[in-house]
Image (tube, helix red, strand yellow):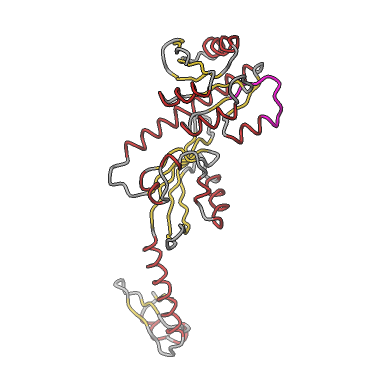
């Protein structure tokens, strides 16, 4: 691995992946002088160097040439997403096609920009770093608020529905290790019949209305279906762009069962009362007569004369 080089006081940790010395000088000068970004960078040339760098520290950004002699950009994306799923990756190209850009974005790249379009490149880098720091800040706040006995299912996912954080109960619920869940698509955990509703639910969250609840029945192999109530909070950056969503899930199966029993009991009671020809009523503490049987108001003139506060069920 090449030695790290400090450019101004350390603030952001950036991995530069390129086999062109001129590109290194160009990118460093561009980010330092034009973008006024304080950063420390490490130059990577091989897959082994990349694996070591990803194990040694957490990186704020990966800036990679699309075409490399010793390493493919596809491998770069896969290695980074496997080791550090939330770290943004920006690919810099010369003469790439639109299809190349689409393919790389689908694999997990955060941005794809032509080298000559330096204003756009600067903006991509700034946005990626801002999103990264906001994500880490919210992650720090969240983790500090989670106590050891926390039982709620807690997760966070980005705009592509890729999981960026899960807590221990979430991992245990889905019977998968945390490492395996990170980077996977949360929609795969939602039953097919609820997915479209879940997507629409998240997309409906706004800066002015970032919090909402969604309830659906979750069913795991070999287990009875359980009702989960998810409280979802969308997180936006300063410009109002959606960054991620934090979800807290509660098992409300028992509550649902009680609701169903009460509803069934109420339905049965109404059916019995409807078939009863007698006048049935009760009086509330406020002196209001509540008629329980289905009768017309003109069938009880004495009662109505006694009290004008008559409510029919």
Please tell me which residue is depicted at 54% across the width and 38% down the height of the picture. Answer: 159
In this view of the protein, which residue sits in the foreground, 51 or 27?
Answer: 51
| Residue 202: image location, x then y, percent | 52, 46
Q: Quadrant of residue 9 in the image?
A: top left
In this view of the protein, which residue sits in the foreground, 28 or 274?
Answer: 28
| Residue 62: image location, x then y, percent | 52, 23
| Residue 57: image location, x then y, percent | 41, 24
Residue 254 belongs to magenta span: no
Q: Quadrant of residue 252 in the image?
A: bottom left
Relative to 41, is 169 above or below? below
Relative to 227, is 151 above or below? above
Quadrant for the C terminus, please: bottom left
The tally of labels here is 0
Please tell me which residue is depicted at 60% across the width and 9% down the height of the picture. Answer: 22
In this view of the protein, which residue sits in the foreground, 308 or 32?
Answer: 32
Residue 98 belongs to magenta span: yes
Relative to 173, is 81 above or below? above
Stretch in magenta: 91-100
Relative to 268, is 138 above or below? above
Please tell me which residue is depicted at 40% across the width and 30% down the height of the picture. Answer: 137
Please tell me which residue is depicted at 56% across the width and 49% down the height of the picture. Answer: 200
| Residue 293: image location, x then y, percent | 42, 83
């Amino acid at each position: 691995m090449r030695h790290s080089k400090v450019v101004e006081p350390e603030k952001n940790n950036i991995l530069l992946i390129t086999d062109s010395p001129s590109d290194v000088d160009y990118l460093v000068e561009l980010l330092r002088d034009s973008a006024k970004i304080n950063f420390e960078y490490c130059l990577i040339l091989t897959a082994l160097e990349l694996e070591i760098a990803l194990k040694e520290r957490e990186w704020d950004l990966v800036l990679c040439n699309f075409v490399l002699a010793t390493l493919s950009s596809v491998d770069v994306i896969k290695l980074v997403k496997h080791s550090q799923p939330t770290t943004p990756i920006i690919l810099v190209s010369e003469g790439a096609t639109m299809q190349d850009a689409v393919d790389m974005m689908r694999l997990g790249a955060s941005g794809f920009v032509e080298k000559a379009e330096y204003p756009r490149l600067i903006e991509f880098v700034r946005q990626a770093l801002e999103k990264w720091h906001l994500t880490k800040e919210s992650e720090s706040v969240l983790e500090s608020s989670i106590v050891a006995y926390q039982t709620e299912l807690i997760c966070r996912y980005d705009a592509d529905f890729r999981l960026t954080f899960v807590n221990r109960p979430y991992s245990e619920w889905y019977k998968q290790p945390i490492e395996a869940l990170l980077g996977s698509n949360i929609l795969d955990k939602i039953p097919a019949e609820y997915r479209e509703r879940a997507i629409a639910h998240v997309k409906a969250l706004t800066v002015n209305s970032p919090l909402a609840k969604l309830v659906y029945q979750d069913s795991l192999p070999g287990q009875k279906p359980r009702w989960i109530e998810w409280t979802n909070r969308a997180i936006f950056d300063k410009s109002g762009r959606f960054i991620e969503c934090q979800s807290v899930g509660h098992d409300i199966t028992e509550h649902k069962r009680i609701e169903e029993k009460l509803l069934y009991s109420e339905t049965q009671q109404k059916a019995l009362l409807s078939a009863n020809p007698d006048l049935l009523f009760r009086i509330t503490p406020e002196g209001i007569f509540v008629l329980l049987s289905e009768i017309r108001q003109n069938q009880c003139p004495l009662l109505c004369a006694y009290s004008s506060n008559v409510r029919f069920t």
